[in-house]
Image (cartoon, rainbow, N blue to C red):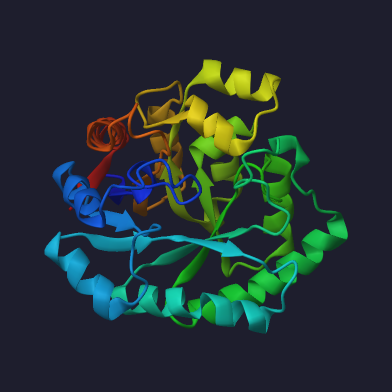
Amino acid sequence: MTGTIRLGVAPIAWSNSDLPELGGDTSLETCLTESRAAGYSGTETGVKFPMDAATLGPILRRHDLALVSGWFSGRLLELSVEEEQRRIEDQLATFAALGAPVLVYAETTGSVQARQDTPVSRRRRLSAEEFKVLGDKMTRLARHMQARGVRLAYHHHMATVVETDAEIDSLMAATGEEVGLLVDSGHACYAGGDWLAITERHAKRVVHVHCKDIRPAVMQQARAQDMSFLNAILAGVFTVPGDGFIDYDAFARTLARIGYSGWVVVEAEQDPAKAPPFEYALKGRRHLADAFTRAGYSIAQ
């Protein structure tokens, strides 16, 4: 066997934090019940999750789910490290108390990811000097988090300041080893990148993995029309592994080559009325379990 991974899921398929009309009426109870029924052993946090360990811990235990991670919208470009530490404290304390190994962090200053009327192309882009400043701050923040037992996993993301392969490379070069990298196959693909090469190039920094698939015709339409990120989601650009064109056998083999072990998370934001979350979560897990098993991994529960 190559190693062990655990399969988790993100709740954004049930309730979308940026588009509340998608799954706005779906309860946390439904999300967690269906996540476990689909075979996942862990979940990331989402818009309907309480952010204190005393409340969240018993809820997750009742559903036999571990806390994997969860998103944080960073603002280090405009705030001091000390201010960012204060903003992140509640989430960091909850994650540390409940044993989440990483916290998903993305710099959202200048992001247009949540602006439905703004094309992806109008996102902010950073100069070499801005990457240097951001990298120094992020390293200090990551060191603070690591001392609490939670790694910073940086999420490259469409419509943000770190979207392309070159921008990922710039951020990794500007930060210390305390800053981990989350590789997201779907975002890398949409950005025109090479998720396999990024994984190999930054092998020592990869601490978390998101798996979403791409519907290529929708991606081509989104690029041609310079859609906003949210409109691309509504059009169906993302789906679960096995329902698009990304080769997850190749991705699993690449992760095996670099010795990755940890969580692999299905995160595919879609319209739940068109893509029923339980059905798609089940499909995504089955596809990933098969791909990672073929790559020599064992799947921990």
Q: Residue at x 31, y 45 (%)?
A: 2
Q: Position of residue 197 (x, y in %)?
A: 59, 37
Q: Position of residue 296 (x, y in %)?
A: 28, 38
**Quadrant, the N terminus:** top left
- Between 166 and 284, the one lying in front of the other is 284
Q: Residue at x 62, y 46 (%)?
A: 113
Q: Quadrant of residue 295?
A: top left
- Between 149 and 29, the one lying in front of the other is 29
Q: Position of residue 254 (x, y in %)?
A: 46, 38
Q: Is residue 272 above or below residue 174?
A: above
Q: Say left or right for 6 vs 251.
A: left
Q: Residue at x 18, y 41 (%)?
A: 38
Q: Say left or right for 221 vs 137.
A: left
Q: Is residue 284 above or below residue 147?
A: above
Q: Say left or right for 156 vs 136.
A: left
Whether residue 3 is visible: yes
Whether residue 10 is visible: no
Q: Is residue 72 above or below residue 8?
A: below
- Between 94 and 24, the one lying in front of the other is 24
- Between 253 and 179, the one lying in front of the other is 179
Q: Position of residue 33 (x, y in %)?
A: 16, 50
